[in-house]
Image (spheres, rainbow, N blue to C red):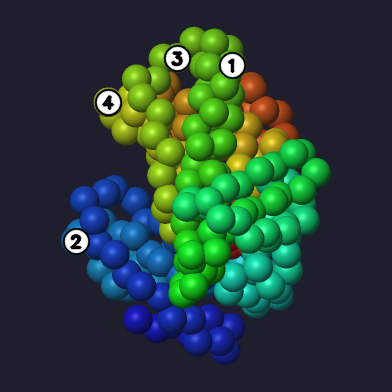
Amino acid sequence: MQITIKDKKITYTLQRKNRKTISIKITNKGEVVISAPLHISDEKINEVIEKKSNWILLKLEEFSLREPLKENTFLDERKLKFLGEKYNLSLFDTFNSNIEIIFDSKNFKIYVPKSIKENKEDYIKAALVSWYRNRAEKIFTEKVKSYAEKLKVYPKRIVIKDQKTKWGSCSSKGNINFNFRVIMAPENIVDYLVVHELCHLVHMNHSSNFWNLVKSILPNYKEAEEWLKINGINLNI
C-alpha cells in the first residue's frame, strides 16, 4: 500500500492482527510495516502514519545512508565480527575431513579440507554459523544467569536461533530465544538484549513499567536500542 507524506510516496505493508493498537516498524531491509487491529479503518491507519511521518522519514533516511551489505563479506574482507571487534580471517588447507575453526582472541583461522572442491564458501559459512551459535549459547547463558539474579526472574529455557528479523523473544511459558548474530555486536548490546527479554518475564508488553524496569538495570538502554536499530543489518556473516 502507499501513502504520500510531505510529497514523498511511502510504500508500506499492512498486517491486520488481533491487537488493540497500531504499531509502525522499519525492518532491517528498510521496509515500513504497519500492524493494526482487525477492524480499524484505513483512514484511521493513515491518520496515525501521518502523525508519525517525521519519525518514519527520519528512519528511512538513516537506512538509505547505511553502507550496503556485501555478500560473503567474511571472505571478501577477510574479517569476522565478534563482540564488537573485527578480527582477521585466514584460510588454510587441511587433509582432515572436517572444517576446523580456531579463534585465539586475535585472529580467526579456518582449516578447510582439500577434499572440498565445490561450494567451499557455503561449507565455510555453515561452519561459522555453528561456531557462533556455540559461542552465543555460552555467552547468553552466563549473562542470563547474572541478570536474572538481579531481576529475581527464572527463565525456563534459553534457545539460540538463526533468525532474520528478530534479535530475541520471550514466550508466556518463560522460554527466551536469542539470535546468535547479536554476539557480533559490542558486549553492551548483548547485555541490553538479555535484560530486555528477561524483563518480559515480569511485563509481557512494552508498557512504561516494562521500560522503567529495563532502565533500572541499564540506565543507558536507549543508546543500545538505537545502535541495534541502525547497525543490526550489518550483523551477518
- State yes or no: discs 3 and 4 in contact (Cβ < 8 Å): no
Res 153 label: 3
Which badge, 1 or 3, is on the more N-terminal residue?
Answer: 1
Disc 4 vs disc 1: Cβ atoms closer than 8 Å?
A: no
Q: Earlier in the sequence, mark 4 or mark 2?
A: 2
Identify the residue under disc 4. 173
Q: Nearer the viewer, residue 43 or 154?
A: 154
Q: Residue 22 at what x, y percent from top left?
A: 37, 56
Q: For the residues carrying marks 1 and 2, which lies nearer the camera in this image?
A: 1
Question: Any mark on residue 146, and which?
Answer: 1
Marks 4 and 1: which is nearer the front? 1
Q: Amino acid at mark 2?
A: His
Identify the residue position indicated by label 2 in the image. Answer: 39
Tag 4 or tag 3, which sits nearer the N-term?
Answer: 3
Q: Is residue 6 left or right of residue 18?
A: right
147, 62: nearer the viewer:
147
Give me the C-alpha separation between circle 4 and circle 2: 29 Å
The secondary structure type at the circle numbered 4 is loop
Please state the horizontal and vertical placement of residue 193, each as a whole percent of the image: 56, 37
Q: Earlier in the sequence, mark 4 or mark 1?
A: 1
Say which quarter of the image contains residue 17.
bottom left
The CA distance from mark 3 to mark 2 is: 37 Å
Left or right: where does residue 230 sit relative to residue 167?
Answer: right
